[in-house]
Image (cartoon, rainbow, N blue to C red):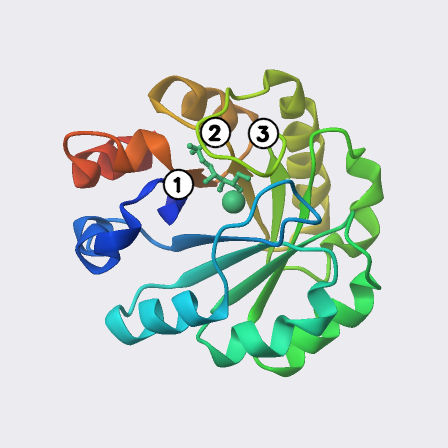
C-alpha cells in the first residue's frame, strides 16, 4: 500500500504540534524539509526544530536534507531524532560515506535526485538504500507544479529495484495532489510526499487517507 509523508513545509509553523496531530494517526511518515540557502535558494528549518518535533510525536521522521554538505550534519540530525536521512546525490559529498554514516547509527537512508539528474547516476547506490527520492519539482519551495517528465525515471527505477528483488521504496516529492499522485503511483512510486495538498486542505487527515488509497 502507498505510504504518505506529509511535508510540514506547508504547515503553520507557529502551531506545529497541532498541525502534526492532524495527520499523525493517518500518515506513515512525516517529511521534514531542511534547506541551507546554498544547495537551494531558500532557508527552512534545522536541528532545533527537529528536536522539538521529536519531543512531541512518535511519527517516523523522514528528513530531507537539501544542504551542500550532508556529511557534516548527519550526526546532528540523527541525534535530534531523524528516523530516515535523505541526502542529495548532487550535494558535495561522498555518497558511500554518508550512507555508511547513517547506517552505522542504525537509521534508514535515502538518496534524492533533482529533476535534471539522470536516473543512471543513482543506480550504483540503490542496493544500499532504503529509499530513493525522485524529485518531481526543483527542490527549494513548496507549492510548485508537478513535472510529469520525471516519471520515466520513476518507472526505470521501479524496474531496476524489481530486478534487485529488494524492498526499496521510491518516494516522489513536489506538486503531489489527488491527480498527480495517481500518475506517480502508476509509474511505480510507493511513498508520496505532500505539502500544500495536505496542509492547505480543509481536512488534512481525509486528504492523507485519499492519497493512501491510490
Ligand atoms: C520542495 C520540498 C517539498 C515540498 C513539497 O523542495 O522538498 O517537500 O514541501 O511541497 P508541495 O507538496 O507543496 O509541492
Ligand atoms: Zn522534500
Relative vertical location of residue 210 with respect to residue 32 in this rendering, above or below: above
Locate residue 140 relative to residue 163 in the image: left or right. Answer: left
Relative image position of residue 168 (x, y in whole percent): 59, 53
Q: Residues within 10 Å of mark 2 (few under 14, many from 20)?
A: many
Q: Residues within 10 Å of mark 1 (few under 14, many from 20)?
A: some
| Mark 3, residue position | 136
Locate residue 188 relative to residue 14 in the image: left or right. Answer: right
Relative image position of residue 163 (x, y in whole percent): 72, 44
Can the viewer see residue 105 in this picture? yes
Considering only order in the chain, which callout, 3 or 2, is on the residue closer to the N terminus?
Answer: 3
Q: Tell which tag, 1 or 3, sits nearer the viewer.
A: 3
Relative vertical location of residue 120 with respect to residue 18 in this rendering, above or below: above
Secondary structure at numbered mark 2? helix
CB within 8 Å, label 1 to label 3 = no
Q: Residue at x 56, y 26 (%)?
A: 187
Q: Residues within 10 Å of mark 3 (few under 14, many from 20)?
A: many
* Distance from the alpha carbon under mark 1 to that under mark 3: 17 Å
Relative vertical location of residue 40 with respect to residue 95 in this rendering, above or below: above
Secondary structure at numbered mark 1? loop
Q: Residue at x 51, y 32 (%)?
A: 174
Q: Residue at x 76, y 29 (%)?
A: 116
Task: Classify the position of the C terminus by image quarter.
Answer: top left
Question: Which quadrant of the figure has residue 48?
Answer: bottom left
| Mark 1, residue position | 2
Secondary structure at numbered mark 3? loop
Asked whether 13 or 166 is in front, the reply is 13
Numbered label attached to residue 185: 2
Question: Which quadrant of the figure has residue 166?
Answer: bottom right
CB within 8 Å, label 1 to label 2 = yes
Task: Classify the position of the N terminus by image quarter.
Answer: top left
* Distance from the alpha carbon under mark 1 to that under mark 2: 8 Å
Beta carbon of the mark 2 residue lies under 8 A of ligand 1: no
Amino acid at each position: 500500500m502507498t505510504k504518505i509523508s506529509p511535508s510540514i513545509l506547508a504547515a503553520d509553523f507557529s502551531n506545529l504540534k497541532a498541525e502534526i496531530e492532524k495527520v499523525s494517526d493517518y500518515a506513515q511518515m512525516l517529511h521534514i524539509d531542511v534547506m541551507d540557502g546554498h544547495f537551494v535558494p531558500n532557508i527552512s528549518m534545522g536541528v532545533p526544530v527537529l528536536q522539538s518535533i521529536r519531543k512531541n510525536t512518535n511519527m517516523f521522521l523522514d528528513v530531507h536534507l537539501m544542504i551542500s554538505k550532508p556529511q557534516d550534519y548527519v550526526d546532528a540530525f540523527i541525534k535530534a531524532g531523524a528516523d530516515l536521512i535523505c541526502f542529495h546525490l548532487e550535494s558535495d559529498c561522498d555518497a558511500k560515506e554518508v550512507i555508511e554514516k547513517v547506517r552505522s547509527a542504525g537509521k534508514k537512508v535515502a538518496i534524492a535526485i533533482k529533476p535534471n539528474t539522470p536516473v543512471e547516476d543513482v543506480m550504483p547506490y540503490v542496493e544500499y538504500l532504503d529509499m530513493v527520492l525522485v524529485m518531481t519539482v526543483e527542490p527549494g519551495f513548496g507549492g510548485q507544479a508537478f513535472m510529469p517528465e520525471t516519471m520515466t525515471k520513476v518507472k526505470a527505477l521501479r524496474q531496476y529495484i524489481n530486478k534487485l528483488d529488494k524492498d526499496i521504496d521510491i518516494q516522489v516529492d513536489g506538486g503531489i495532489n489527488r491527480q498527480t499522485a495517481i500518475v506517480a503511483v502508476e509509474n511505480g512510486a510507493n511513498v508520496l510526499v505532500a505539502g500544500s495538498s495536505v496542509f492547505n486542505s480543509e481536512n488534512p487527515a481525509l486528504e492523507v487517507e485519499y492519497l493512501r488509497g491510490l
